[in-house]
Image (tube, helix red, strand yellow):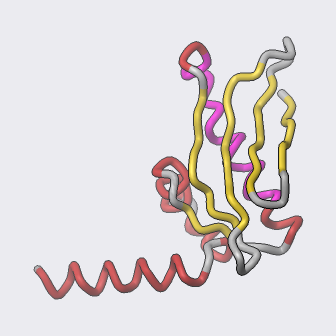
Amino acid sequence: MNFKQYDDAKEGRFFVILDNEMEAGWIQYKWLGNGNLLANGTRVYEEFKDQKLGIPLFNRLVEFAEERKTKIYPLCPFVVKTFARHPELKHLLADDYLQEQVRVTESTVLLD
C-alpha cells in the first residue's frame, strides 16, 4: 500500500494506492487561514470497504499534520470518531475544535 498526495495550498487529498496500483480511496482536507487542516471527508471505494483502509488514510493525515507541526479540525464523521477512539492524539486537535467540544459538553450537562 502506498499513498499519493495532491495539495494546491488551498486543499488536498491523500489517496491510498494498493499494491496492484489501484486507487482504493482518499481522505481530504482544506488549509485554514490559521495554518490548521480542516479534515472534511474520507471515502473508501465500495469494492475495498472490507479492507479497513480508512485507518491508514487517517494515520497518513496525522503523520502529515505532525510533519507540518499543524493541527487538525475534524469535520468528517469518520475522522471525528477516530480521534475519539485515540485520546493519545488529542494534542493534534485544533484549539478551536477543542473549545467547541467543551461548549457542547457544557450545554449538554446544563440540559440534563
Please name whichever residue, 44 or 1, is drawn nearer the observer in this view of the structure.
44
Location of residue 67 (image quadrant): bottom right
Height in image: 106 above or below 62? below
Image position, residue 1 (x, y; %): 83, 27
Name the quarter where the C terminus is drawn.
bottom left
Location of residue 11 (image quadrant): bottom right
Residue numbers of the magenta segment = 48-64
Q: Looking at the image, which residue is at 76% across and 60% down?
A: 10
Image position, residue 47 (x, y; %): 58, 13
Image position, residue 84 (x, y; %): 49, 61
Please name whichever residue, 29 or 109, is drawn nearer the observer in this view of the structure.
29
Counting every numbered tag in the picture gives 0
Based on the picture, tell me whether residue 29 belongs to the magenta stretch: no
Image position, residue 4 (x, y; %): 86, 36
Q: In the displayed structure, does residue 109 sit left or right of residue 31?
A: left
Height in image: 19 above or below 85? above
Location of residue 51 (image quadrant): top right
Main SS of the magenta part reads: helix
Q: Looking at the image, which residue is at 76% across and 75% down?
A: 35
Q: Looking at the image, which residue is at 47% across and 85% down?
A: 99
Q: In the displayed structure, does residue 99 sit left or right of residue 91?
A: left
